[in-house]
Amino acid sequence: MSGLTDPRKEFGRAVTALADDNERIVVLSADSGKSSGFGEFATAHPDRYFEFGIMEQGVTGIASGMASTGLIPVFAAIAPFVTSRNYEMFRNDLGYMRQNAKIVGRNGGFTYSDLGATHHSLEDYAIIRMIPGVVVFAPSDPGELRSCVAAMIEHDGPTYTRIGAQPLPDLFDEEPVVIGKGRHLREGSDVTVITTGYITTETVAAVDLLTERGIGVDLIGMPTPSHLDAELICASAARTGAVVTVEEHYVTGGLGGAVAELLAQEQPTRMRLVGVPHAYAPSGPYDGLLEYAGLDAAGIVRQVTEFVSR
């Protein structure tokens, strides 16, 4: 690991760098452009930066209209407000119309920790992956964030990208993100662990502890939880015979649900879904909420150990 990076600033820098060479990229804000990392973009490209105020539903419709003219709108705001609040517009204006618009939810998961359940985003993978044709990106570290932004812009169609707010360490060498392809991060024969998004930092720490204790973990990173790498996941599940999913999302409907749907049809395997209990979570410090959900490294170690020892 080499220092920590603010994911919102890194996201804004990545979009701005691509926009320098692609005049089709425009940025839309619902009164939170700078908080979403777009201060540099607004200065560099003021004619392609649009501030609308707090009206996420309307901005989603405007993004659809802009996309229909050949532009590539990038609309970022607080995660539950661009997924739950404007779900009908996301589904109909973007998904059904196959518009090439990019929706980005910042402060995803628990990262708006102190503001409580109204600002937590723990069901976004579930509801957005139900919209046909929408790709969900969930980067795990700064390098994967930059690669997800590149893949998001390159993809011709609607996307949703969840970014957090907690400072991130570099975990892996930067590689291009390919929709529907996972990353084989560790090799082991006792259990397959599949993870996505920023909880990968805690998952990697947990896997290192499990390895020290003699439990071999086959670790897979899945940057597109809506589009799984079926070949990689099924092959690993066949080798280990046990699969654990880890995500900063409700245990219902997210990465774990998607993997369970896949394995039930292609490679029936016993599973354990590690995620947030399906209830309204309390408010509090971010680290405290991870501990509450069993998503800190110690909690992940405990749950994987219990599962493999059955």
Image: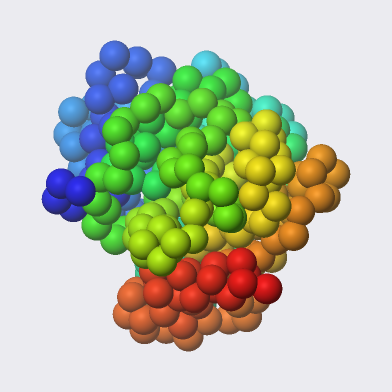
Residue at point 52%, 81% (across, down): 281
Residue 298 showing in the rendered view: yes
Asked if residue 225 is positioned above or below residue 173 in the image, the reply reads below
Residue at point 34%, 15% (across, down): 22
Tell me where residue 267 sits by quadrant.
Answer: top right
Drawn side of residue 86 relative to residue 106, left or right: right
User: Total number of numbered labels?
Assistant: 0
Drawn side of residue 241 relative to residue 74, left or right: right
Front in this rendered view, residue 215 or 307: 215
Tell me where residue 114 sits by quadrant.
Answer: bottom left
* Horizontal and vertical percent position of residue 242: 67, 56
Residue at point 74%, 60% (across, down): 270
Residue at point 14%, 50% (across, down): 3
* Horizontal and vertical percent position of residue 51: 35, 44
* Horizontal and vertical percent position of residue 286: 34, 74
Drawn side of residue 182 relative to residue 307, left or right: left
Front in this rendered view, residue 12 or 205: 205
Asked if residue 284 is positioned above or below residue 180 in the image, the reply reads below
Residue farthest along the left direction in this orientation: 3
* Horizontal and vertical percent position of residue 135: 60, 36
Residue farthest along the right direction in this orientation: 265
Residue farthest along the front direction in this orientation: 214
